[in-house]
Amino acid sequence: MIKSRIIYLLLTALVLLLSSCDKESKLSPTEDLGIVDMFSPDENADPRVKTMYNDYGVWVRTYFSSIDELTNAILAQDALVAMRGAENLEEEKVPEVLNYSEALLSNVSEQYSKSFFPLEFFYVKQYGSLYWIYPVKALGRSRLILMWPNTTDGAIPVTDPVNHYYQDSVLASEVWRKLGSMIVARMEEPLKEFVAGGKAYDDGEAYEKLGNEYDKDEKRGKKKIRMRMMKMRRR
């Protein structure tokens, strides 16, 4: 009697489970989770911020209300800085970082930026504290954090905000070093049509050609030197 009752309950549960599955014969993702709204400027944002977001798919952020908002990116967290703290960008510096971002983004195509660039450039006055200061920080592959003014070793003071991106090669090199690793992390495979980023991907063919030409030139140079030495001896 007990066994039959248990079997009955199991069958009933199985029927209920199967009937509930029939409500959606094919599983599909929820259409709108609000993710885009969470990682995009609102309607009251600076027009320049909205233009960069619409054109390049990059949200330039200059303020955080809590440390978690800064140190929690998509699929990445920075618990160390979350404990030690960071400081918001000074309001008068906002135009400077917008100039810097516009100059940086103008060097790539809109298509390339939307495909491979991080979703956010986040500018702060300080990121970390004491011996754990990070002038340029890649948080996962979706957020690049920059201190402003930047304290990267060799970086120069901001004297010309409009052209600072082109004047401070040290900072630009460090930013692109971080961006490079983030871009590669977003690529599923090497691109054959890498022209959109300004550099054709040729699977190393150009490097080999240059190397071969270099070897030829070196051999020619050595041959000329030998011929000159022989002439000098004859004299």
Image: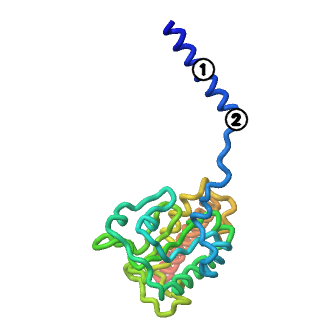
Q: Residue furthest left?
A: 130
Q: Residues within 10 Å of mark 1 (few under 14, many from 20)?
A: few
Label 2 amino acid?
A: Lys
* Helix, strand or loop for disc 2: loop
As rendered, which of 33 and 57 lies closer to the eye? Answer: 33
Instruction: Describe residue 229's horizontal placement relative to residue 183 as left or right.
Output: left
Callout in the foreground (2, 1): 1
- Residue 23, above or below 54: above
Q: What percent of the width, then of the height, locates residue 51?
A: 66, 77
At a point 44% along the width and 84% down the height, the residue shown is 90
Q: Is residue 122 visible?
A: yes
**Relative to 220, is 75 above or below?**
above
- How far apart in space, not on screen, are marks 2 and 1 (Cα)? 17 Å
Instruction: Give the residue at the far top of this rendering.
Output: 1
Residue 91 in the image: x percent, y percent? 47, 85
Q: Position of residue 174 (x, y in %)?
A: 46, 74
Residue drawn at (54%, 58%), measured in percent from left and top?
185
Residue 174 tag number: none
Tell me the SS state at disc 1.
Answer: helix
Q: Using the image, determine if residue 24 lies above or below residue 206.
A: above
Q: Is residue 212 visible?
A: no
Q: Which residue is mark 1?
A: 12
Q: State if disc 1 and disc 2 touch (CB < 8 Å).
A: no
* Residue 60 horizontal/vertical position (percent): 55, 75
The image shows a total of numbered marks equal to: 2
Alpha-carbon neighbours of circle 2 within 10 Å: few (<14), some, or many (≥20)? few
Q: Disc 1 residue type?
A: Thr
Q: Is residue 223 left or right of residue 55?
A: left
Nearer to the camera, 63 or 96? 63
Residue placed at 62% from the left, 26% from the top? 16
- Residue beneath label 2, please? 23
